[in-house]
């Protein structure tokens, strides 16, 4: 659960839409962008 929430918390504003639209795939993208 931490892995899913981590990117969301990092970019709650910019990645929120991406996470809501893509789900797990978006989480992987957010994790890469955040890294």
Image (cartoon, rainbow, N blue to C red):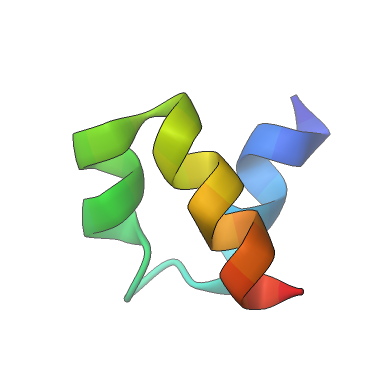
| Residue 7 percent across, percent down from the top left | 62, 57
**Residue at (34% x, 74% y) in the render:** 13
| Residue 34 percent across, percent down from the top left | 66, 74
Q: Using the rendered view, name the quadrant where residue 31 is placed.
A: bottom right
| Residue 32 percent across, percent down from the top left | 65, 64
34 or 2: nearer the eye? 34
Q: Using the rendered view, name the quadrant where residue 28 is placed.
A: top right
Q: Using the rendered view, name the quadrant where residue 16 is placed.
A: bottom left
| Residue 3 percent across, percent down from the top left | 76, 38
Position of residue 31 relative to residue 28, above or below, is below
Q: Quadrant of the N terminus?
A: top right
**Residue at (37% x, 29% y) in the render:** 23
Q: Tell me if 18 is positioned left or right of 26 in this view.
A: left
**Residue at (53% x, 43% y) in the render:** 27
Position of residue 14 relative to residue 27, above or below, is below
Q: Tell me if 35 is positioned left or right of 23 in this view.
A: right
């Amino acid at each position: 659960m931490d892995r899913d929430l981590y990117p969301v918390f990092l970019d709650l504003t910019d990645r929120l839409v991406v996470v809501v639209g893509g789900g797990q795939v978006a989480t992987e993208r957010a994790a890469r962008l955040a890294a």
